[in-house]
Image (cartoon, rainbow, N blue to C red):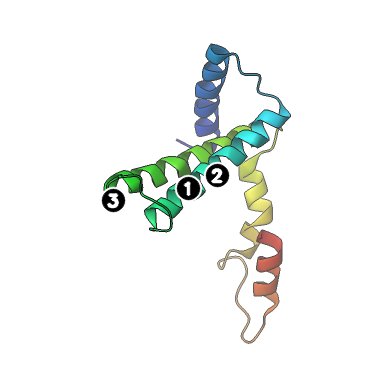
Amino acid sequence: MDLRQLTEAVEAVSSTYARKHGIIRDDTWFLLKLQEEVGELTQAFLMRSGQARDEGHSPQELELGFRSELADVLSQVLLLARHHGVDLEAEVERKWMPWHPDRFPARSGSRTADAAVSTDTA
């Protein structure tokens, strides 16, 4: 499945859920839902890394929780981009791929590439 297919599949799930539960998915909802999922990912990461209470979950459950929250964050990013008409593949190509090592040969002793990546991608 490519990114566009994945986005449309995620949209089908999200829109069905929203209709079933009377959720209005407006600009604010898409952004706040992403923020909610990032918070849940943070909590799962902290639990998995031993920096928060594990709440009695096994290491396997903590790992599954972390993986699940990563999927939620990705899905919400896809939904947010779709809602705003952003072609994520094109934007990643524009923003990140010029710095790919195959396209941007490293220069000996030069910090230009590293500086550009750190300021452009952060």
Q: CA distance from mark 3 to mark 1?
A: 14 Å
Write down the quadrant of residue 109 in the picture.
bottom right
**First in sequence: mark 3 or mark 2?**
2
Q: CA distance from mark 2 to mark 1?
A: 6 Å
Where residue 69 appears, as percent x and y from the top left, is: 46, 42
Kind of residue indicated by mark 3 = Pro
Residues under numbered marks 2 and 1 in contact, where contact means CB atoms less than 8 Å apart: yes
Count how many numbered circles sit on residues in the image.
3
**First in sequence: mark 3 or mark 1?**
1
User: Which of the two residues, 28 or 46, is positioned nearer the viewer here?
Assistant: 46
Which residue occupies 65% across, 32% down?
30
Q: CA distance from mark 3 to mark 2?
A: 20 Å
Side of 70 where 63 appears, left or right: left
Kind of residue indicated by mark 1 = Gln
Disc 2 element? helix
Which residue occupies 69% across, 37% down?
86
Where residue 110 appears, as percent x and y from the top left, is: 67, 83
Which residue occupies 56% across, 19% down?
15
Above or below, comparing residue 69 to residue 112 in the picture: above
Disc 1 element? helix
Side of 103 where 64 appears, left or right: left
Side of 19 where 110 appears, left or right: right
Which residue occupies 63% across, 57% down?
96
Q: Quadrant of the C terminus?
A: bottom right
Count residues near mark 2 (Cα–Cα under 10 Å), then give few for <14, some for 14-19, many for 20+: some
Residue picked out by circle 2: 39
Residue picked out by circle 1: 43
Above or below, comparing residue 64 to residue 13 in the picture: below
Side of 110 where 9 appears, left or right: left
Disc 3 element? helix
Residue picked out by circle 3: 59
